[in-house]
């Protein structure tokens, strides 16, 4: 009985790959497919940049509105901002219109569809690699972890880039319309929240876009994967 228990322990024993090693493998995989990774990331950058631009524009406009300067309020109205709250500047505020929210939502949706398509193509190209890893003992959860880490790295980098580009574009647009007053009443805290929200949103979108491709990769049988001619 003692020998049988020892054999069972040996059979049930699994080698767990450290998370840092998984991150290293995911990073090397992105570098090996840099062009496809850039295409996927650019889609995310554009969507997050548009999201960040629209929200940062509203944040800057609200900062100018709270200044109470009548000339700035007039300039905001001239640009096309709808000021809610009447003449009471403390209660007044500017928000995105329903049309703008729909456009932002559609752009993010298109971004997710693009990520899903790119990731599915990436999985197709890596059938043999996935089959080799499974033949070497990789379990389904390792394949899932690897693809999720790749998506998270791409998503974070793309979202961070898009968030800064969109915010810089909003600042440039505001400086063009309102001049140096933007710097005097710049809403640092609100812009910081917008940057964080844009990065988190982009990272989540990247993870959502990779879920279906990850399921396809994890369910793949090693024999079927090795048969595919890439």
Image: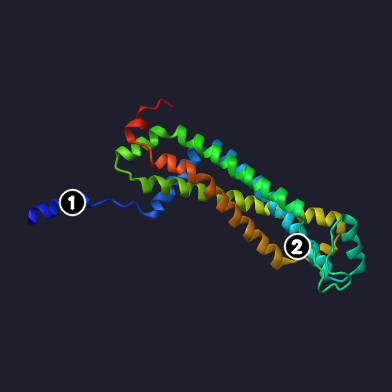
The residue located at (39%, 35%) in the rendering is 129
Mark 1 / mark 2, whichever is N-terminal:
1
Residue 176, above or below 193: above
- Tell me the quadrant of the picture where the C terminus can be found: top left
Q: Secondary structure at mark 1?
A: helix
Label count reads 2
Is 125 left or right of 43, judged from the image as shown?
A: left
2 relative to 208 in the view: left or right: left
- Residue denoted by label 1: 10
* Position in image of residue 47 (x %, y %): 66, 47
Quadrant in the rendering for residue 136: top left
Q: Crowdedness of circle 1 by 10 Å Cα count: few (<14), some, many (20+)?
A: few
**What residue is at 39 percent from the left and 44 percent from the top?**
143
> In the displayed structure, would residue 129 be above or below residue 5?
above
**Foreground residue, 144 or 153?**
144
Q: Is residue 169 visible?
A: no
Could you say which quadrant of the image residue 214 lies in?
top left
Element assignment for label 2: helix
Crowding at mark 2 (Cα within 10 Å: few <14, some 14-19, many 20+): many
* Residue nearer the viewer, 146 or 35: 146
Residue 1, percent from left and from top: 7, 55
For the point 64% across and 42% down, the residue is: 110
**Mark number displayed over residue 59:** 2
**Residue 182 image point, x, y percent:** 82, 62
Return the x and y of residue 125 as percentages of the image width and height: 46, 32
Quarter location, residue 183: bottom right
Q: Nearer the viewer, residue 55 or 215?
A: 215
Q: Are marks 1 and 2 in contact (CB under 8 Å)?
A: no
């Amino acid at each position: 009985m003692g020998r049988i228990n020892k054999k069972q322990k040996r059979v049930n024993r699994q080698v767990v790959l450290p998370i840092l090693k998984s991150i290293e493998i995911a990073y090397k995989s992105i570098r090996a497919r840099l062009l496809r990774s850039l295409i996927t990331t650019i889609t995310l950058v554009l969507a997050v940049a548009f999201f960040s631009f629209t929200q940062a524009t509203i944040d800057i406009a609200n900062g100018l509105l709270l200044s109470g300067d009548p000339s700035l309020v007039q300039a905001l109205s001239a640009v096309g901002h709808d000021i809610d709250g009447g003449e009471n500047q403390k209660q007044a505020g500017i928000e995105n219109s329903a049309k703008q929210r729909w456009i932002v939502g559609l752009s993010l949706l298109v971004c997710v569809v693009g990520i899903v398509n790119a990731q599915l193509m990436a999985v197709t190209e890596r059938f043999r690699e996935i089959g080799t890893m499974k033949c070497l003992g990789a379990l389904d959860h390792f394949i899932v972890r690897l693809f999720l880490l790749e998506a998270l790295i791409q998503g974070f980098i793309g979202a961070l880039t898009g968030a800064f580009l969109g915010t810089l574009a909003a600042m440039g647009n505001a400086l063009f319309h309102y001049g140096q007053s933007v710097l005097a009443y710049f809403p640092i805290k609100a812009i910081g929240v917008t940057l964080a929200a844009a990065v988190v949103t982009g990272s989540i979108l990247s993870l959502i876009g990779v879920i279906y491709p990850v399921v396809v990769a994890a369910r793949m049988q090693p024999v079927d994967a090795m048969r595919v001619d890439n």
